[in-house]
Image (cartoon, rainbow, N blue to C red):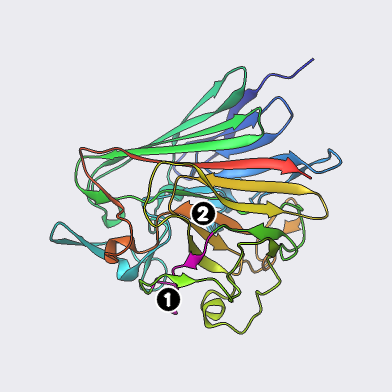
């Protein structure tokens, strides 16, 4: 008898102010499971099979709500209003300079001190014959973290019977503002150890190089002949210790790969990952023009989940997005959202084995 997709909502914990946080356990007909909490829209667990059919968790997370509140390096979270960095926490829009919260040295990172990853989202479960998931909704008030305009955001996570997690994001504003939403899951397809033997392919010929503060210089640089060339599959660790200034700035890979020079709504492959021991595969697709690849360089072993320590380079992130610091880089595709428009983006994770 074929299982039907299901989603079960339960209390996950409560914040200090007694606000309840709920968890949705989403399962498809093949037994894949994705756990999502209403705090930050965080994906706390993903169970997928290896090549022998054994299920295992392939993402980093924590065991309880307190740990997410206390010390989360964006594990599994929805990132907003602006994914990645904005130089010196400021930008000018229609002649007005806006000052944002600075939480990464002098720069603004991932939405600020109280970004979307630290908000309580309204979470509504749903199930159909072919999928199950949750709709997450959040209203960010005018001036939140320094951003102009009230932003009404909706994110839908849909786990399908095709073994994909299909994520759609929409937002509207009542004033001109900037928006760059993404998802920040940390993956380890082996479920343990480091990720240096994972085989990664990114179909991109250019990166946006950065300065020592990881702010783009504004240039586009070819990956040809550099450690950043993943146009053909190679182990993440193959060139990661190369004597390259960009790798030194990022302490490894923490760079934005350009997928399209002009944004459109076409869903394309952003990355393809294969873990040789378990046979697990991950394909990331998106409509975004770029993807940030991060090799877990700031994980330091100070956190863990169910006894598994989050060691240095024990997970990687692939964050589809617009380019970092776009509001200050006129040559980059715009991240401005006007009241007359609807922001829309899509990220798809496809799970498999070989």
From the top left corner, tell me how far across and down residue 351 is, in percent.
68, 41
Tell me which residue sits at (20%, 37%) in the image: 340
208 magenta-colored: yes
Tell me which residue sits at (77%, 53%) in the image: 190
Dot 1 crowding, Cα within 10 Å, few <14, some 14–19, many 20+: some
Q: Which residues are magenta?
A: 204-216
The disc, 1 or 2, on the residue closer to the chain's N-terminal end is 1
Report, in whole angstroms, how far the alpha carbon at label 1 lies from the one at label 2: 19 Å
* Pointer 1 residue: 213
Check the image and report above or below for 338 versus 71: above
- As drawn, the residue found furthest toward the top would be 1
Q: Quadrant of residue 54?
A: top right
From the top left corner, tell me how far across and down residue 228 is, in percent.
58, 70
Residue 330 relative to residue 184: left or right? left
From the top left corner, tell me how far across and down residue 42 is, in percent.
54, 44
Residue 21 relative to residue 29: left or right? left
């Amino acid at each position: 008898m074929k299982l039907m997709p299901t989603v079960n909502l339960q209390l996950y914990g409560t914040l200090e102010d007694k606000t309840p946080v709920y968890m949705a356990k989403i399962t498809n007909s093949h037994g894949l499971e994705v756990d999502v909490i209403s705090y930050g829209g965080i994906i706390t667990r993903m169970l997928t099979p290896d090549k022998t059919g054994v299920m295992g968790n392939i993402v980093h997370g924590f065991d309880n709500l307190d740990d997410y509140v206390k010390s989360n390096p964006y594990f599994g979270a929805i990132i907003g209003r602006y994914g990645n960095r904005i130089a010196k926490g400021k930008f000018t829009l229609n002649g007005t300079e806006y000052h944002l919260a600075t939480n990464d040295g002098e720069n603004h990172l991932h939405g600020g001190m109280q970004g979307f990853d630290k908000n309580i989202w309204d979470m509504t479960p749903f199930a159909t014959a072919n999928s199950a998931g949750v709709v997450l909704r959040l209203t960010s008030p005018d001036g939140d973290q320094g951003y102009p305009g009230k932003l009404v955001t909706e994110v839908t996570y849909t786990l399908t019977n095709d073994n994909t997690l299909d994520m759609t994001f929409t937002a509207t504003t009542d004033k001109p503002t900037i928006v760059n939403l993404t998802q920040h899951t940390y993956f380890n397809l082996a479920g343990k150890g480091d990720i240096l033997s994972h085989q990664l392919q990114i179909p991109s010929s250019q990166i946006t190089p950065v300065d020592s503060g990881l702010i783009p210089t504004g240039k586009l640089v070819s990956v040809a002949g550099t450690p950043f060339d993943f146009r053909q599959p190679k182990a993440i660790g193959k060139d990661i210790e190369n004597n390259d200034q960009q790798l030194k700035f990022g302490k490894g890979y923490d760079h934005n790969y350009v997928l399209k020079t002009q944004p459109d709504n076409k869903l394309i492959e952003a990355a393809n990952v294969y873990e040789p021991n378990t046979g697990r595969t991950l394909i990331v697709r998106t409509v975004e023009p770029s993807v940030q690849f991060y090799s877990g360089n700031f994980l330091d072993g100070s956190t863990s989940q169910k006894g598994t320590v989050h060691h240095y380079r024990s997970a990687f992130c692939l964050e589809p997005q617009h380019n970092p610091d776009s509001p200050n880089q006129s040559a980059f595709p715009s991240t401005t959202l006007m009241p007359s428009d609807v922001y829309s983006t899509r990220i798809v994770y496809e799970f498999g084995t070989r």
